[in-house]
Image: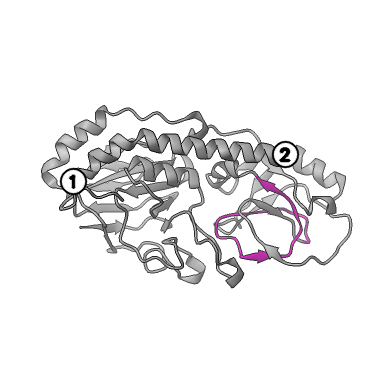
């Protein structure tokens, strides 16, 4: 029960919702850059819980399935194909032994997420299967995929059930709540934070009224932005504090950096604001050269939007119970398995 990596792609790593509770030890949270797409892929593959998905960046891998499986793709459209035939995004897909999953040109987005029903057999490191490349920690041997890697599946499907399962899944409708749909906004919503008062009014006007461009120096740790500098009222030393996903920190040159999934555990630069959690998936799907704009939002509204997103995920999960049961009945030697 395994998958063979024929070509690894540009940067293919396993990610889940992150390694929480260890920042005080200097261990970054990490996890999927686009949590929305990661969660959607898991649910549509018939998983009940947060299992590691393969985060595929720009250039996808080529994978040979050596055992039957049910998979799903969400996030960036990187022209996936199965045995050379275009494969749909956001649908459960039945893979036969010997099938080849590959990717082509980028149509939109940057990061695609591939989920397997039952997940890949990866060790849990500090409560997470996420790959942290700088620390060679977690995921598949703490690194990105390489040619000829063998990825062991936790579960495989019975070969004699595949055709009937594929027909049943094809007939099944999946209704994605509008809250979870990919509807790019013209402006990313930003909340003020405890350091906002350290910046000049000119800095705030620039942040909320000027375009910024993502630079080539951006990565999973942070997106560096090029645009109007954001001056502080006075230079002062700040105590280091925990770094959060979406914080907009401003170093001495005044050019903002949005902290992303692999952010450092603590930081001492002043933070002019925080990108709302619901808009981080859109930012994660941007690439160097893309332009972003910001608008102000209050904390209460950001919390409400986040609650609506969580409620939508719960409704989607409940609506897919029938899909899960269909797939679980086809699991080899474990008809009642519940990943």
On whether residue 13 falls in the magenta region, the answer is: no
Q: Residue furthest left?
A: 160
- The residue to which callout 2 is attached is 298
Q: Say what secondary structure mark 2 lies in.
A: loop
Instruction: Pick whichever of labels 1 and 2 is earlier in the sequence.
Output: 1
Is residue 188 placed above or below 97 in the rendered structure? above
Dot label at residue 96: 1
Nearest to viewer (mark 1 / mark 2): 2
Residue 46, above or below 126: above
- Chain part drawn in magenta: 252-275
Q: Decide if residue 207 is on the left or right side of residue 201.
A: left
At horizontal 36% and vertical 61% (from top left) the residue drawn is: 145
- The disc at residue 49 is none
Quarter of the image with the N terminus is: bottom left
Residue at the (25%, 27%) spot, across then down: 171
* Front one among 229 and 237: 237
- Counting from the top left corner in percent of width and height, residue 204 is at 81, 44
Q: Residue furthest right?
A: 234
Residue neighbourhood size for the residue with mark 2, other residues' Cα within 10 Å, grouped as few (<14), some (14–19), many (≥20): few
Percent of width and height locating residue 108: 47, 38
Determine if residue 34 is in view: yes
| In this rendering, position of residue 139 left or right of residue 2 | right
SS category of the residue bearing label 1? loop
Q: CA distance from mark 1 to mark 2?
A: 49 Å
**Taking 84 as reference, is 134 above or below it?**
below
């Amino acid at each position: 029960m395994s998958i063979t990596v024929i070509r690894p792609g540009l940067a293919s790593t396993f990610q889940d919702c992150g390694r929480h509770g260890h920042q005080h030890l200097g261990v970054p949270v990490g996890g999927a850059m686009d949590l929305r797409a990661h969660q959607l892929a898991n649910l549509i593959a018939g998983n009940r819980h947060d299992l590691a998905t393969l985060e595929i960046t720009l250039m996808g891998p080529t994978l040979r399935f050596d055992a039957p499986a049910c998979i799903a793709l969400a996030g960036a459209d990187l022209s996936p194909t199965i045995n050379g035939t275009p494969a749909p995004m956001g649908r459960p897909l039945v893979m036969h032994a010997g099938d080849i999953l590959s990717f082509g040109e980028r149509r939109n987005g940057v990061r695609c997420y591939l989920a397997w029903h039952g997940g890949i057999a990866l060790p849990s490191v500090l409560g997470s299967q996420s790959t942290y490349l700088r620390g060679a920690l977690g995921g598949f041997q703490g690194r990105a995929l390489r040619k000829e890697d063998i990825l062991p599946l936790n579960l495989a499907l019975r070969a004699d059930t595949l055709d009937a399962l594929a027909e049943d899944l094809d007939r099944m409708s999946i209704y994605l709540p509008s809250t979870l749909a990919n509807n790019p906004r013209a402006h990313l919503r930003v909340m003020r934070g405890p350091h906002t008062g350290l910046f000049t009014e000119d800095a705030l006007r620039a942040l909320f009224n000027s375009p910024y461009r993502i630079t080539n120096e951006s990565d999973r740790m942070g997106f560096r932005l090029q645009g109007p500098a954001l001056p502080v009222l006075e230079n002062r030393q700040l105590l280091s504090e925990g770094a959060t996903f979406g914080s907009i920190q401003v170093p001495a040159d005044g050019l903002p950096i949005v902290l992303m999934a692999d952010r450092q555990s603590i930081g001492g630069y002043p933070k002019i604001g925080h990108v709302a959690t619901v808009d981080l998936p859109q930012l994660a799907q941007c690439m160097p050269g893309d332009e972003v704009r910001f608008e102000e939002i209050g904390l209460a509204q950001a919390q409400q939007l986040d609650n609506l997103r969580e409620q939508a995920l719960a409704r989607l999960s409940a609506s897919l119970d029938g899909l899960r049961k269909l797939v679980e009945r086809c699991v080899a030697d474990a008809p009642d398995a519940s990943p």
